[in-house]
Amino acid sequence: MAFADGSGTRLAHITEVTEGTTPSTPAFNELRFTGETLVGEKQTVVSEEIRPDGNVADVTKVGFQAAGGISFEMSYSTFDDLLESVLTGTWATDTLVNARDRKSFTLEKTFETGGTDVFRRYLGCIIGSLSLDITAKQIIKGQMSVLGRSYDAANAIIAGATYVPANTLSVMNAAADFASLDIGGTSPEITIKRLQLDITNNLRAQDKVGTDALAGIGLGQVVVTGVIDAYVEDIQILDLIDDHTASSLIFTIGSVTNEKYTFDIPKLYLIAGDALTPGNNQDVMISMNFQGVYSNLGPSPLDDHTIDITRNVA
């Protein structure tokens, strides 16, 4: 018997037609990742019954769900269907805007253990949040959180299952692959050292009397926030913060034609931040927190949203 090794783990996913049910003869898509914390959460309650001998009377199972996270390095086209899930939207040609569409997946981990592998599956999974970290001289890294309805284990593939290998496109970095940045049309363009974008759709587990399974997963508000660390060059960013003037944020990642993404938050506010002097021989920086809000600035109601992503950018 061989022990499972992290370097040999396969993580794969497939879009579900019926939420919580893996399609028959599934064609799983292998997923590129750097780590994961997906777990089957068995929920238990300890009995408070008082016994004369001082012992605990029982521990009872009251529920279960799947939860955790997936860490990754950003690459083109790898996560397009997962982006739909976190934005609760659907790609229309090459544009994705936040909406109220549900998309769930079965996620499967395969652990190589010699003659018989171990499979762990998480069903009815929705991506609850996305965080992108774009830091100077670093690979663009990301983290997704997951909430799912159930889980199981097996020692064989699902009957008829196939596995589509992940693409091998280069991972993106914050140097060659940070194509452009525009904050509210500021001029000259500010110089930044780090940009973090956070998107959450505020998932919630919906419990039900009469079963330990989830009744469902609820969708909350799509909230878009982030942090920009910028060098202090002039007064314009301080004015945006102090005056509470509505602004915007557009940035593009990728360096290959038609293998880029543009992220657009058409309306946001810089809600906190100030110029700080950390000490001698250091740059004066300003760390700005922002939050996107609903914008109806588009040419039609279909353009009204908080965030949109465009792929296949030239």
Image (tube, rainbow, N blue to C red):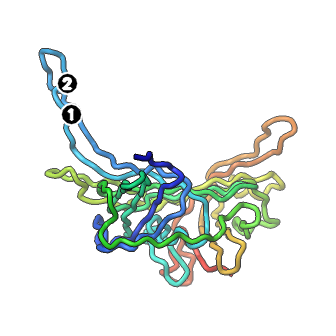
In this rendering, would 23 be left or right of 179? Answer: left
**Residue 229 in sight:** yes
Q: Residue at x 36, y 55 (%)?
A: 116
Does the residue at mark 2 contact the one at mark 1 (Cβ under 8 Å)?
A: yes
Q: Residue at x 44, y 45 (%)?
A: 3
In the picture shown, does residue 67 fall above or below 219? Answer: above
Q: What's the CA distance linking mark 2 and mark 1?
A: 8 Å
**Residue 290 in sight:** no
In this rendering, would 305 be left or right of 1? Answer: right
Q: Which residue is mark 2?
A: 56
- Looking at the picture, how far across and down is residue 133, in whole percent? 63, 55
The quadrant in which residue 47 appears is top left
Considering the numbered disc 1 on the image, is that residue within a helix, a strand or a loop?
Answer: strand
In this rendering, would 278 be left or right of 242? Answer: right
Q: Which residue is mark 1?
A: 59
Question: In the depicted view, which residue is nearer to us: 297 or 218?
Answer: 218
Question: In the depicted view, which residue is nearer to us: 288 or 253?
Answer: 253
Considering the numbered disc 2 on the image, is that residue within a helix, a strand or a loop?
Answer: loop
Q: Amino acid at mark 1?
A: Val
- Looking at the picture, how far across and down is residue 20, in whole percent? 29, 64
- Looking at the picture, how far across and down is residue 293, in whole percent? 53, 63
**Residue that lies at the very extreme toward the top in this rendered image:** 53
The quadrant in which residue 117 appears is bottom left
In the picture shown, does residue 199 fall above or below 79? Answer: above
In the picture shown, does residue 159 fall above or below 146? Answer: below
Mark 2 nearby-residue class (10 Å; few <14, some 14–19, many ≥20): few
